[in-house]
Amino acid sequence: LFVLQVYSEFCFIVFTDSLGDLSKDALKQRLQELTEEVDVLHSELEVAQRQLEGKQEALKILQSRAVFDKATTHTKTLLQKSEERNKVLEKEVNALQWEITFNQVQFRNVEQSWKDKYDRVCSDNKSLGDSLEDKASELRQVKSENAYLSQQCLELLAMLNVKEQKMFQGSLPARSSMVREGTALELAVLGACNCSTSEEEPCPCAQSAAASRKQVLQLRQELDVQKKRKEEAYVTADAFRIAFEQQLKRRSDQTFRLTETEGHLRKDVPRARKEEGMSGSLSVAQRLKGLLLSTAEGRKLEIQDDPAETLQMLVDLLNDKEEALAHQRKVSYMLARNSEELERRL
């Protein structure tokens, strides 16, 4: 449009300039040429305008396609992410469904097991209740029989004298809370007894129970005696062991003192020879007497002044000690044998 307007203005200017020089026919011809040129230009302008419009439409299409491509890529990514999320959710849902089904199965199994246990406990309780009723009836019967037997026992005790009553009470086992529990032998005898109690004389089962009680009493007395003997043997053995240790200690002390005295005597022999006749000198017997005064054997000895007699006396004393020691060893060995035999019997 702008080009057409410029061309028209240019033609108008040329037309006005050449209007005065040209004739009318020339002007018509010139106008016709100009009109033709205008028509051509107008047609070219329309073609260019159409091309421009087509290009604008193509540009719009391309822009819409670009926007659509961008939108489609975004939507594709969103769809892909949503599909991935859906897959993850499907996996989680499947896992939860499997866990729910597994828990339901386990719950059913546990429920069934508890039902079975409850039924079994109910049946056990019913059987125990029935057995308890039977035991209660048996206990009532046994209590009645026990009352009857205790009455008979009191009547029999009343028929005995005081000494026999004491002997019978001593043969009974210890009482606890005024209820006496029978021994295993008595319970076995009473449980196996099928004798009738209508007779006045005691049945053989009662006689065997009484004999077993007497035998148990005798065994208890023998056991007490053996325990006392064992304690006495232990005391005697301890006494002999203490005496033996004391004698060994005294013998070691005496040996040590004799060795010291012998050493002193050897050192004092030259001095004694030089100082013979002096009133302050001590003899060997006096020195031995001074050494042995601390012991009980030294107080009983009468030490002579002759060294040979003193030495002989000491040798005899040592032999006596050895004999006493051997005797004590024999006694301790016999006591040990006796204690072993007592332990075997017990």
Image: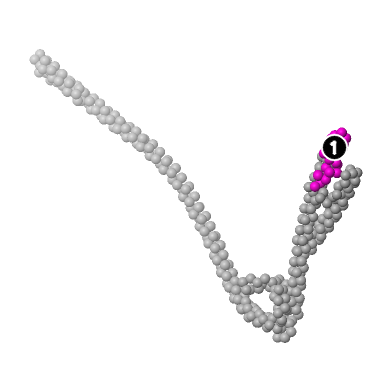
Visible residue check, residue 188: no
Q: Is residue 163 above or below residue 65?
A: below
Residue at the extreme left of the image, as rendered: 20
Q: Is residue 346 above or below residue 251?
A: below
Residue 16 x %, y %: 10, 17
Q: Is residue 109 magenta?
A: no
- Residue 105 placement, left or right of 269: left
- Residue 261 placement, left or right of 169: right
- The quarter holding residue 62 reads top left
Task: Name which residue lies at 77% across and 64% down.
Answer: 226
Q: Nearer the viewer, residue 58 or 288?
A: 288
Q: Is residue 275 above or below residue 252?
A: above
Task: Name which residue lies at 22% across and 25% down.
Answer: 45
- Residue 307 placement, left or right of 194: right
Read off the magenta span: 266-293
Residue 173 x %, y %: 69, 72
Q: Nearer the viewer, residue 111 or 241?
A: 241
